[in-house]
Amino acid sequence: MQNIIGKTVRGTIDRPIGSRHPRYPDMIYPINYGYLDGIFAPDGAEQDVYVLGTDKPLDAFEGKVIAIYHRFHDAEDKWIVSPDGTDYPDEEILQAIRFQEQYFDGELIR
């Protein structure tokens, strides 16, 4: 898992800032959320990512993986990507992803 941190990745944003969760319409995405094109997670779907560092909705992204949020009781971890490579403090990352991760037990891996 830790060998991906620092790597540059590309992907698609399917839930841009301001969009609603497809199953939970009361959940509004405060950050861009998407997936890596062609890289599959253990759940069989493309690897999910949170993209920090912009307050504008995106369609696609390229950036550096700065952390991984490991869910203890889920098949898939969430990768944290920074388009410009900025390394955010743990507290800032956890606050940014809390809107969704508050429902899961996990830890931030650096």
Image (spheres, helix red, strand yellow):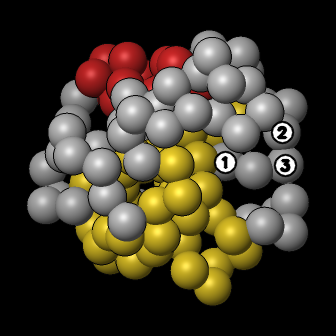
**Element type where label 2 sits in the image:** loop
Q: Is residue 17 above or below residue 73?
A: below
What amino acid type should be assigned to the residue bearing mark 1? Asp
What amino acid type should be assigned to the residue bearing mark 3? Ala
Q: Report the side of 78 relative to 45 (left or right).
A: left
Across the whole image, how many numbered discs are drawn on residues? 3
Whether residues under marks 2 and 1 lie with C-beta atoms below 8 angstroms apart, the answer is: yes
Q: Is residue 98 above or below residue 40?
A: above
Pointer 2 residue: 74
C-alpha gap between disc 1 and disc 3:
7 Å
Write the residue at 23% across / 29% down: 89
Pointer 1 residue: 77
Pointer 3 residue: 75
Q: Position of residue 62 (x, y in %)?
A: 30, 73
Q: Is residue 81 above or below residue 38?
A: above
Q: Report the side of 5 relative to 19 (left or right).
A: left
Q: Position of residue 4 (x, y in %)?
A: 47, 68
Write the residue at 86% across / 69% down: 44
Whether residues under marks 3 and 2 lie with C-beta atoms below 8 angstroms apart, the answer is: yes
**Element type where label 3 sits in the image:** loop
